[in-house]
Image (tube, grey):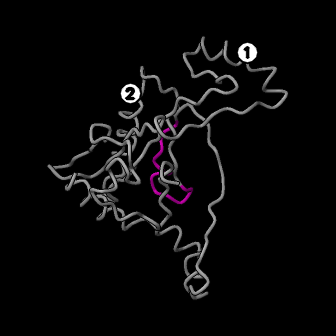
Amino acid sequence: MVELIRFWRSSGRQRSFFPAYQLSDFQSDGIMRGLRPSDILIARWRGQIVGTMAAWDQMSFRQTVVQGYGDLLKRLRPLINAWSRLRSMPELPGIGQSLALRLAALPIINSEHSDCFPILLQALRQLCSGSRHRYLVLGLTEHDRLHQVLPRLPGQVYRTRLCLVRWPDTPESQVDNYLQASFLRQYPPYLELGSL
């Protein structure tokens, strides 16, 4: 884990809001709790780590439970699920059931090796296939260079907004600098969905 943390700290500098991970973050009470070393995929180039991605199962302490469906989706759900079964795709769960998902955590790729991202993502999909998890969720911002090499995969894109919050004593100029599009393109925000 020490080598991984060193890699994350080095490569994480390319992202805004990247955590300064420590070994304690991966303990039972840390921000990455439940993520085991065996869940982490590692890409190497000439013996050096150039990329990571992990399948984070949070079902033991955090779940997304379906509370209901809109009228149209409620009526179409049996047809959608029949079609999904025919295509070996995940079905829409029943009301009160949780989504069987894993989070694609730690999508950290060295800037010179972006080509390993689709390979890691495909390996992660393979790792998750056949398990009780039917969904894999990955979070990237539109300016993230990994978004540019994201392979076309079956799935759903969910767009949302990131909000910038500041302390009252933060200088306005610092906030203005961050909000400039050039800064966001150069240092896109890091999204670790399991820690939000």
> Which residue does the image show at 54% across and 16% down from the upper left?
88
Q: State yes or no: residue 27 in magenta.
A: no
> Which residue does the image show at 53% across and 29% down from the upper left?
100
Amino acid type at image mark 2: Gln
Is the residue 38 above or below the residue 83 in the image?
below
Amino acid type at image mark 1: Pro
Give the residue number, with chain letter if any, for mark 2: 126
- Residue 28, position in %: x, y? 35, 47
**What is the span of residues highlighted in magenta in the rendered image?**
141-152
185, 89: nearer the viewer: 89
**Gap in angstroms between the C-alphas marked 1 and 2:** 28 Å
- Residue 149, position in %: x, y? 45, 47
> Which residue does the image show at 40% across and 41% down from the upper left?
118
Mark 1 is surrounded, within 10 Å at the Cα level, by few (under 14), some (14 to 19) or many (20 or more) other residues, namely few
Residue 29: give its label: none
Is the residue 189 above or below the residue 180 in the image?
above
> Which residue does the image show at 46% across and 66% down from the upper left?
17
User: Disc 1, disc 2: CB below 8 Å?
Assistant: no
Furthest residue in direction left, as rendered: 47
Q: Is residue 182 left or right of residue 80?
A: left
Give the residue number, with chain letter if any, for mark 1: 78
Tag 1, which secondary structure? Answer: helix
53, 36: nearer the viewer: 36
